[in-house]
Image (tube, helix red, strand yellow):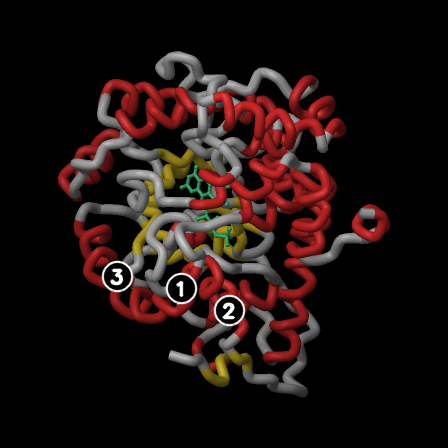
Amino acid sequence: MGKTLNLIPVTPLDYRRLAEARLPRFLFDYIDGGANDERTLASNVDDFARVLIKQQVLRNVDNLDTSTEIAGKPASMPVVLAPVGMAGLFGRRGEVQGVRAANAAGVPFTLSTVGICPLDEIRSASSVPFWFQLYMIRDREVIRDLLQRAMANGCDTLVFTVDLPMPGMRHRDVRNGMLDTGLRGKLGKVWQLGTRPGWVWDVGVKGKPHSFGNLAHVVPDPTDLAVFSQWINRQFDTSVTWKDIEWLRGIWKGKLLIKGILQTGDARDALAVGADGLIVSNHGGRQLDSVASSISKLPAIAEAVGGQMEILMDGGVRSGVDVFKAIALGASAVMIGRPWVWAMAGAGEQGVRDLLAVFKRELEIAMALSGVTRIADISRDNIDSTPW
Ligand SMILES: Cc1cc2nc3c(=O)[nH]c(=O)nc-3n(C[C@H](O)[C@H](O)[C@H](O)COP(=O)(O)O)c2cc1C
């Protein structure tokens, strides 16, 4: 513990250690874990490590520039903070801390459907439009209402997540009693909370309310996680098809990005229904274990539809060097999930700012040593080899 507290964090894994020291076990594991045996979770990270970059020297990299456009808006680098549910439990008003850090770094922030902070709280905290993420809910009036509120609060980009018709099987959450309403689950959580008095005071007491801000008016008891998960199981719509996305496209006037695409066929369907872009993603390895890593699926999807729509990817991005690899393999930008949440949980808004500054520096170095000075100039030619 002493060593952890003395650590000056640099990488996402450093922040992960800080987060582990601050969070009750069930919350730390909720962030950290993935579905089943966590194979996809591991391969998201491992496959990035196996992509090799070409070092190319003496090409005058004096005027290096990481800035780019994402969903039609300028950004300081091709990175977006991914939607993460319940971020307001990992740090006090966690989504507010996230959006402020994203603003300062000049990158977009995405608010989850199941964020703790509601849309208007994020709007007040943010100096620029932010992105909103939505899951398909059976009651289409709830969807219409959420979309209207998102528009009214200045959201210009909708991230529609399609890889969660039902929540994945995350064994750590079951073991930790995360969603257990019974006595055993309750006692287990009280015990875990008892080991983290700092979190109890800083987030548990001073970070209230802990309701699901955007859904507080429709979920029976939004502060009770078990009740909420039952509501999700009833309300998350397993009957969704591309027809529903067409419907959505008709009522959402801003940019529409479909999140959770892994196959070229699905990518073509996303294009056909009029989406502006897609996010190659397996939900950070939290849904179906044993699907391929996102980075290994990116090149084929980029080749199939890349010229016609915007291609983002997420899953396993842990440095600016990884950002470079994803851009070289066909993405126009990446999303990061766990890295920003670990930084926020472990070191607050400043932690997220510092982490994003490290990503930018690493991206600059990767560009300089590859001999490119513009994001648009990064290409497949900068890749030495991939394992697939
Ligand atoms: C704790 C946690 C909660 C998440 N909640 C959501 C969510 O509410 N909506 C969503 O579309 N994706 C959600 N995701 C997935 C992320 O948006 C993203 O796809 C994933 O974290 C990327 O992988 P990475 O964590 O390796 O960066 C969540 C991920 C984590 C770790």
The amino acid type found where label 3 is placed reads Gln
Image position of 4 with respect to 166: above or below: below
Image position of 83 with respect to 290: above or below: above
The amino acid type found where label 2 is placed reads Asp
Q: Secondary structure at mark 3?
A: loop
The residues tagged by marks 2 and 3 sit, at their Cα atoms, a distance apart of 20 Å
Q: Secondary structure at mark 1?
A: loop
- Which numbered dot is residue 293? 1
- Which numbered dot is residue 306? none
Foreground residue among 247 and 348: 348
Residue 256 visible? The answer is no
The answer to whether mark 1 and mark 2 are in CB contact below 8 A is: yes
Q: Residue 240 appears at what percent x and percent y?
A: 19, 38
Residue 64 visible? The answer is yes
Snapshot quadrant of residue 21: top right
Q: Residue at x 57, y 25 (%)?
A: 187
- Which numbered dot is residue 263? 3
The residues tagged by marks 3 and 1 sit, at their Cα atoms, a distance apart of 12 Å
Foreground residue among 262 and 17: 17
Q: Residue 70 appears at what percent x and percent y?
A: 46, 51
The amino acid type found where label 1 is placed reads Ser
Q: Earlier in the sequence, mark 1 or mark 2?
A: 2
- Which numbered dot is residue 46? 2
Q: Residue at x 54, y 72 (%)?
A: 49
Q: Earlier in the sequence, mark 3 or mark 1?
A: 3
Q: Quadrant of the C terminus?
A: bottom left
- Please give left or right for residue 321 compared with residue 133 in the image: right
